[in-house]
Amino acid sequence: MAMARPIPPGGAARVGPEPRDHGKVRLESREEEATHVLDEARMVLPGIQALFGFQLVAVFIQRFSSDLAPWQQLVHLIALYLSRSQSPRS
């Protein structure tokens, strides 16, 4: 697990040395960091939406009511509700 690195005064974070820099450290502005975070979120979001869709569809399959006990169905529906309530609103 990667540890968060503190942002030094001046609003720039250290980024690892690039091969052509021979050990020099390049600074990344907060704007570049925010852009990087947003790009990563855009890549992950479609996968999360697909998984949420499969979980939602499971409720409408006949096996959901025949193979799961009522308490298991309730747990699934509560988890579905909680996962939706934690997702960002658009």
Image: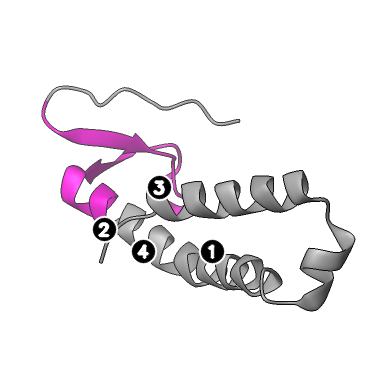
Part of the protein shown in magenta: 10-35
State yes or no: discs 2 and 4 in contact (Cβ < 8 Å): yes
Q: Earlier in the sequence, mark 3 or mark 2?
A: 2
Q: For mark 4, give the secondary structure.
A: helix
Calculate the distance from the C-alpha at mark 3 to the C-alpha at mark 2: 23 Å
Marks 1 and 2, how far apart in space?
Answer: 20 Å
Q: Residues within 10 Å of mark 3 (few under 14, many from 20)?
A: few
Q: Which callout, 3 or 2, points to the residue nearer the camera? A: 3
Residue 66 percent location from the top left of the image = 86, 66
How many angstroms separate mark 3 from mark 1 (CA)?
12 Å
Residue for point 57% across, 47% down: 78
> Which residue is rendered at x = 60% and y = 54% of the image?
77
Residue sitting at x 88%, y 62%: 67
Q: Dot 2 surroundings within 10 Å: few (below 14), some, or many (20 or more)?
A: few
Instruction: Say which mark, if any, is on residue 86.
Output: 3
Q: Earlier in the sequence, mark 3 or mark 1?
A: 1
Q: Earlier in the sequence, mark 4 or mark 1?
A: 4
**Tag on residue 35?**
2
Q: Is residue 44 magenta?
A: no
Mark closer to the chain start, 3 or 4 = 4
Q: CA distance from mark 2 to mark 4?
A: 6 Å
Check disc 1 and report its element: helix, strand or loop: helix
Q: Which mark is residue 39?
A: 4
**What residue appears at the point 38 percent right and 26 percent down from the top-left corner?**
5
Q: Identify the residue position indicated by label 1 in the image.
A: 48
First along the sequence among labels 1 and 2: 2
Q: Nearer the viewer, mark 4 or mark 1?
A: 1
Question: Where, quadrant-wise, is the N terminus in this rendering?
Answer: top right
In-image side of 61 versus 19 (left or right): right
